[in-house]
Amino acid sequence: MPAVNIKFIVSSSESERNFEAENLLRKDANSRTKWKGKAGASSNSVVFQLEREVELESLDIGNESSALIEIFVAKSADNERVYHVLIPSTSLMSPMESRLQRNGNRVTMFSRRDMIQSVAKQKWDIVKVSCCQPFNDKIPYGLSFITFIAAGNVEKKDTEFVKKPMERSMDQKFDKRLETSTDKCIKMLKEKQTERKDQRVSDVNSKGFSNEPSSNDSTSPIVKRKKSKEPEGKEEKSATDTKVNEENVEKANVINEKKVDKSKEKVVHNPPKHVDNKESSTSAPFNKILSGVRFTLSGYKNPLRSQLRQKAKEMGAFYEPDWTARCTHLICAFRNTPKFRQVGSKGIIVSERWIDSCYTKKKRLPERLFALV
């Protein structure tokens, strides 16, 4: 955002000797740049002619003992000059600072949000600055410096849309490379996805074939091993062994089925316990932790007072300046304050640690742990 040069001073109020308004045109920091109007004047003003019509974005102003400032704008092309308020009357010094002649050289930066929007959207080339010092009629007052900053829309558009032929060609090449690289990436991702799908299908098929039920799955492995080891002459013994093995297998299956049933029962009974734990551990949303709490504070000074009030309000509590019949809690710094004696047993009295702990742990804690007794 470029600074706008001041072309010349159109007019100014009567100034102190060696502190004329023309000093504001100087850019050298080593030379005198202050403008001081007469002490005791109801107002001191200066009118600037800018080098061109601009839409002002911001103003940087160095104060020189002025308590109030107001800024107007106009157009030199108008037959009858009409001033419009750009920045309403704004305080630069408090009455106490003015009387004690302290902090009279603050720098204030006025942005677009400080301006009247309907006026700020237009272009102007004349600016009038009006200063006042109603709290001390013994000090000259005015400005130390002033800087005008114009909106930089024109320069941005030029830099954005005007490109050299070489830059355009480079952009086109880069776009093509980007398109090819993205196409390759998409192609590789699709190939990987198809490979994964094929692998999943093959795994499912293999598992399906291996798990097909057969009539002798449970007994045949044991029987086959026994038969392969025994000689041909012991057929009766092998038959009895197979019967015994079949009985053992059936018993083992029954035991396994009982174990599975027990494990299923455990699994069935566990979920409600887990749900109960979840329900007990879940807390209210942060902005509703102290919902229903209506509190007031006693014994605290700022900034701690405002911090406690803000924390409690963020957690859903409602603040009352004084204790009322609707209040539920008193946040008290120490015992025997006027509000402490007023509340007595009518409400809950806790220290500020209750607010801080609830805010830190993000849940409502019991008041009895923080009771002020």
Image (cartoon, rainbow, N blue to C red):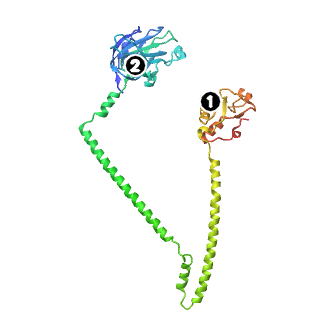
Identify the residue shown where x is 35% and y is 26%. Answer: 2
Label located before the other in sequence (2 or 1): 2
Q: Is residue 329 above or below residue 239?
A: above
Identify the residue shown where x is 31% and y is 34%. Answer: 160
Alpha-carbon span between mark 2 and mark 1? 39 Å
Q: Position of residue 361 (x, y in %)?
A: 61, 42
Q: Position of residue 150 (x, y in %)?
A: 36, 24
Q: Which residue is mark 2?
A: 146
Identify the residue shown where x is 49% and y is 68%. Answer: 208
Q: Are marks 2 and 1 in contact (CB under 8 Å)?
A: no
Q: Residue furthest right?
A: 345
Mark 1 is on which residue type? Answer: Arg
Q: Position of residue 169 (x, y in %)?
A: 25, 41
123 vs 243, nearest the viewer:
243
**Can you see residue 184?**
yes
Identify the residue shown where x is 65% and y is 62%. Answer: 265
Mark 2 is on which residue type? Answer: Ile
Q: Mark 2: which secondary structure?
A: strand
Query: For mark 2, does the 10 Å Cα neighbourhood hold few (<14), some (14 to 19), or many (20 or more) residues?
Result: some
Q: Is residue 257 left or right of residue 202?
A: right
Q: Position of residue 79 (x, y in %)?
A: 34, 10
Q: Quadrant of the N terminus?
A: top left
Q: Which residue is mark 1?
A: 305
31 vs 186, nearest the viewer:
186
The quarter holding residue 256 reads: bottom right
Q: Quadrant of the C terminus?
A: top right
The quarter holding residue 33 reads: top left
Q: Is residue 348 above or below residue 215?
A: above
**Can you see residue 111?**
no
